[in-house]
Image (spheres, rainbow, N blue to C red):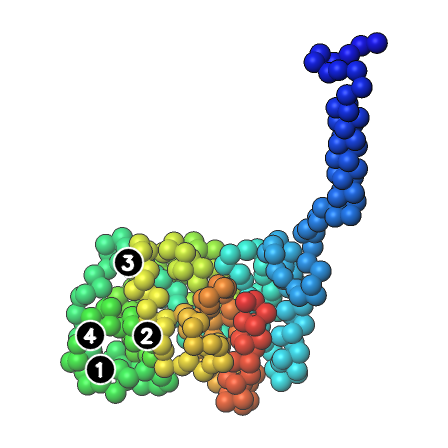
């Protein structure tokens, strides 16, 4: 019989050792099953919804936004276009976006873009001072220069600012016909891919306005300094009751309105805390301008609430 060295016959050492081992094993088994290890689930079962991963946020659906816009219009407009293009994604929603409308004053946007293209190339000095002639004055519609006396002076840059912020028709006439010419502007418009814009006959479409606004906003017309200058002219205009009308105060809108008899437009870029998109609203056959302007603000708010 094998003995452990140093252990005498009749010793209680081995039985005690075996009993100790049995107690230890039994204790471990009891602990394992009596107190199982807690496994934390990655799924929240508290009943509170947590947006853990933006990957699972709802994808925007153009058809859903189209339905919401049409619901907002609710047959109040017969002939209209609404076009929305997200700057940060491929989202696009269009209602009659390729339909051609009388451009009215939204066609002052291509004049501005052409002017700053020429300035970028050194062909136009924006600080050059021009003297107002009697034949320059366009005594109709919007703007303040129509009330100025011949002999008044303006820099080209000031004329550009008044053309955009006041929609000044005299400023647009001087810039589009004397500083530049409509043929040059027309060639630039065609080169920019605006196939539905006719500067001579004052026609354009929502899709064409999206093209030029995106080019300006993306800095594809002029350098960063001139681009910032241009966009300063799109802000805080005399006409903030359409696209910007019902939007939150922390939202910036760079836009241009257009008005003629039966025509009410507004096109621009909306920049909010979480969203950035082009929106154009164009109408024809309008009989109540005030009501249409309010409806355009509601359409803009509908789009913003969806896009944000």
Q: Residue at x 26, y 66 (%)?
A: 179
Mark nearer the N terminus (3 vs 1): 1
Mark nearer the N terminus (3 vs 4): 4
Residue 134: mark: 1
- Residue placed farthest to the right in the image? 1
The residue nearer to you, when weighing 120 against 50, is 50
Residue 225: mark: 3
Rendered-image quadrant of the N terminus: top right
Q: Which residue is mark 4?
A: 154
Where residue 28 sits, quadrant-wise, is: top right
Q: Residue at x 46, y 67 (%)?
A: 272
Q: Residue at x 70, y 13 (%)?
A: 6
Q: Is residue 24 above or below residue 5?
A: below
153 sits left or right of 257 in the view = left
Mark nearer the N terminus (4 vs 1): 1
Q: Disc 2 vs disc 3: which is toward the camera?
A: 3
Find numbered disc 1 in the image and state the secondary structure of the residue it sits on.
helix
Q: Could you tell me residue 291's position as x and y percent? A: 54, 89
The residue nearer to you, when weighing 35 against 91, is 35
Mark nearer the N terminus (2 vs 3): 2
User: Mark 2 to mark 1: distance in Å?
Assistant: 18 Å
246 sits left or right of 126 in the view = right
Q: Disc 4 vs disc 1: which is toward the camera?
A: 4
34 sits left or right of 210 in the view = right
Find numbered disc 3 in the image and state the secondary structure of the residue it sits on.
helix
């Amino acid at each position: 019989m094998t003995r452990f060295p140093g252990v005498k016959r009749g010793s209680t050492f081995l039985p005690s050792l075996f009993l100790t081992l049995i107690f230890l094993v039994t204790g471990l088994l009891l602990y394992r099953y009596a107190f199982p290890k807690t496994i934390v689930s990655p799924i929240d079962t508290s009943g509170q919804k947590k947006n853990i991963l933006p990957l699972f946020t709802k994808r925007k659906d153009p058809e859903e936004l189209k339905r919401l816009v049409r619901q907002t219009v609710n047959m109040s407009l017969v002939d209209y276009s609404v076009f929305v293009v997200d700057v940060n994604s491929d989202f696009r929603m269009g209602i009659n976006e390729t339909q051609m409308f009388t451009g009215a004053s939204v066609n002052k946007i291509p004049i501005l873009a052409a002017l700053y293209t020429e300035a970028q190339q050194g062909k136009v000095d924006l600080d050059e001072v021009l003297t107002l002639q009697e034949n320059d004055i366009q005594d109709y519609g919007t703007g303040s220069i129509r009330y100025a006396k011949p002999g008044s002076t303006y820099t080209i840059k000031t004329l550009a600012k008044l053309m955009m912020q006041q929609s000044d028709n005299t400023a647009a006439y001087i810039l589009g016909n004397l500083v530049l010419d409509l043929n040059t502007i027309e060639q630039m418009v065609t080169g920019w891919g605006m196939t539905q814009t006719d500067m001579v006959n004052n026609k354009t479409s929502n899709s064409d306005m999206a093209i030029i606004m995106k080019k300006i906003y993306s800095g594809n017309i002029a350098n960063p300094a001139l681009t910032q200058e241009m966009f300063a002219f799109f802000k805080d205009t005399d006409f903030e009751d359409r696209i910007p009308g019902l939007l939150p105060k922390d939202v910036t809108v760079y836009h241009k309105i257009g008005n003629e008899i039966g025509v009410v437009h507004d096109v621009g870029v909306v920049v909010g805390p979480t969203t950035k998109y082009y929106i154009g609203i164009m109408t024809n056959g309008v009989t109540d301008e005030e009501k249409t302007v309010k409806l355009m603000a509601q359409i803009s708010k509908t789009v913003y609430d969806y896009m944000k």
